[in-house]
Each structure stands twice: as structure tokens, then as C-alpha cells.
Amino acid sequence: MRKGVAWAATLALGGCVLAPGPYMGVAPREDTTTQADGQSAPAEIVQNGITFRLHALNGEMIAQLAAAAAPFAPSALPRVVPSAYRVRSGDVLRVIVWDHPELNNPGFSALTTSIVSVGATQSTGMPAATSGGNLDPNGRVVQTDGTIYYPYIGRVKVAGLTVDQIRQDIFKRLDKAVSNPQVDVSIASYRSQKIYVSGAVHTPGTISLTDVPESVSDAISGAGGYSQGADLSAATLNRGGKVYPLDLYAFFYDGDVSQNVMLEDGDVINLPERRLKKVFVLGEVNKPVSQIMPVGPFSLSEALSDAGGLNGISANASQVYVFRQGPGRTVDVFQLDTASPGMLVLGDRFELQPRDVVFVDAAHVTRFYRVVSQILPFASSLYLGTEAFK
């Protein structure tokens, strides 16, 4: 009777050991096909309509991936050549004719001073503007039709012109009424041209373009700088309805000035947050984690280290996988054999991408240990009877 029970228990153990478990056990070097050019092609497994392509991680594969992930070169981005500022509707001009205060802006001649009593021995001068029409206490506002009004010469078309061109035009017209007028034109307020900064910056909003050319880094600085959670490598520039990627990490940390493009009116700079930029480390590690990627490159070795490393008892060091979404319904699976400590150097060169899933497979013997731990109470009662519970 005892032998029959023992035989039944052995069969139960054997059946459980052979039962399916989390072990994948597919080695790329054993599951490759040969292409027409003699090159080995990755193994492909189709499950539920999804094609899993298996790649062995080696120096050549890592070099190919690094080349494909090179920083974006914004050569396709329309270049902005710095040039003199051109006035548009909404800007405020300051026009001064020396020795003729009656022609000057309200800020110089149309402001009267009224004395306001503050105390027995104190008074202060407070300017009172008497502007009208397109006049402003600081200058003359360019109207929607692109003109300003100026005494003696009437309406002057200024939109699309530089301040030097406006000065020359006013001088020629005014010279008929005033002998050799000394005309000076400047921009009192820039209101017509704006760029927009959104996302993970301290003060998102609009920034006015001035006569000083504005670059991407200038715009981010004007928005208070990027926040701690900004994803610098995934910044975008929206220009004319087209979105261009910008790798600002390459600019701020690697000095790649090609990413610091010049801006023009209507450009939108967006810095997304890094909170959705995660990697997942699962399987036979000491601490499975869902981790937000830090600023800059994040390697496979770093991810495994942050997860507490491989479980020394249950992990199969030769079966470390990285699952990465490919085009369409495909998933690229990269396998790294870390059984040799030297292979961890390759893991440090393999950069993870957002939403990568790192999976450490279980060792063959792990399933046996798990079965034993589950069946141990039942087996103990069979062999040892009530003695097992004393």
C-alpha cells in the first residue's frame, strides 16, 4: 500500500514538473532561418495575430540599434535666417522728431503735468495722457490695416517694414513740411509676433518675438526653464501645422547645437512629461518594478540593477528578454545571455526605450522547486502521517 501511494506521488510530481510554467526557453541561435544573402534572420513566432521576432543581443546588433536611435538631425526643418525685425499690426512705434515737440509721441509732448498735493510740504508730478486715435502713452499703435497716423503726412504704411525703412519714409514725407527733420524711429512694444511654450516648463505661455533672434533654448529659458519631470529627448516643434522632433537632451548635455533651432512667429515648443516614459522589469528579479526612465540614456543593466538584480535561486541568467513594440502587429524580442559576467557590458550598452518590458525567465529547476513547495504539505501527510503536524 505504501509503495502504491509513493508511486502515485511520484507520478504527480513528474506531471507537475512537465506542466507549463513561465519558462520561455527559446534560444535565438537555435531558432534562426537563413536569408537569401546568407545572413541569419531572426526567429518569428506568431501568437494571437502578433508576430514576435527574436534577436540575439551581440555587439553587432547593439551597434545597429544605436545607429538607428541617433539624435534627430533637423535638416528637414525649414531654416530661419536671422534678419531685421519687420513691424506688424499691433506693434507700438515711438517716433521722435528732434526740436519739434509738437510732433512727438504723447509720451513726450501730449503728457501734461498736474500737481497732486500729498502733504503740507510734499507734492509729486503725475503725467496725464491726452492721447487719441492710434496714439498710446508710449507710442503709436500699428493699426489692423498696417498703418499709423502722423501729423502733416497722414497715414503711413509701416507693416512689413524695418524701423530703418519706416524712418526713411517718414523723413521723405515730413521734409516737405519741416526743413531737414531729424527723425528717430524705434519699437516701444513688441506685440504682433509670438511663440508658444507648453508642457513641462515652469511658466508655460506666450513669448513675444523682438528684434533679437529667438532660439529654442531662449524660449525655454523665457518660460522659466524646464521642470524636473521634462522629457528633453522627446521635445517637439510645431511649425505651420507640421510637427518636428527635437532632442534637447542632446543639446543641453551633449552640446548638439543643431537641435537649438531658430524660431519664427507662431512656433509652438512642447516638452512632454516623463511620467509616461516607463520601463517594466518582470520575472525572476528580486524586486519587479515599473520605473520612470531618468533623464538621458537608460541601459538594460541599469534597469536590472534597479530591480535588485536577478534572483540567484530562480533566475535563468541566459534568458533575459526585452520586449519592444515594433511596426504594426509585431514585437521585437531581444535576448541577452548574462550567464557570463562579461555580457553585462553589452547590457550596459543596450539602451532601453519607453514602454520596453524586461523579462527574466525562470530556470528549468525552478518549476520543480515550486511544485515541491506546493505539494510538500500533502506529501508530508502521506509519508509521515500525523507526525508531520506535531
Image (cartoon, grey):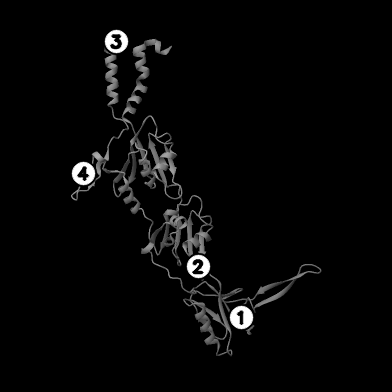
Q: Are marks 2 and 1 in contact (CB under 8 Å)?
A: no
**Amino acid at pointer 3:** Arg
Residue 115 relative to residue 349: left or right:
right
Relative depth, front residue between 316 and 287: 316
Residue that label 3 marks: 2
Q: Are marks 2 and 4 in contact (CB under 8 Å)?
A: no
Q: CA distance from mark 2 to mark 3?
A: 91 Å
Q: Residue furthest left?
A: 36
Residue 319 relative to residue 292: left or right:
left
Instruction: Give the answer, above or below, for where 259 lies relative to 29.
Output: below
Task: Give the SS element for disc 2.
Answer: loop
Task: Give the SS element for disc 1.
Answer: loop
Q: Disc 3 or disc 1, which is closer to the eye?
A: 3
Residue that label 4 marks: 33
Mark 4, other Cα within 10 Å: few <14 / some 14–19 / many ≥20? some
- Residue 342: x and y, percent? 36, 40
**Amino acid at pointer 2:** Leu
Mark 1, other Cα within 10 Å: few <14 / some 14–19 / many ≥20? many
**Amino acid at pointer 4:** Thr
Q: CA distance from mark 1 to mark 4?
A: 84 Å
Mark 3, other Cα within 10 Å: few <14 / some 14–19 / many ≥20? few
The tag on residue 104 is: 1
Considering the image in quadrants, where does the N terminus appear?
Answer: top left
The tag on residue 209 is: 2
- What residue is shown at x 57% (from left), y 80% (from top)? 184
Task: Tell me which label, 2 or 3, sits earlier in the chain.
Answer: 3
Q: CA distance from mark 3 to mark 1?
A: 116 Å
Residue 225 visible at all: yes
**Amino acid at pointer 1:** Asn
Residue 47 visible at all: no
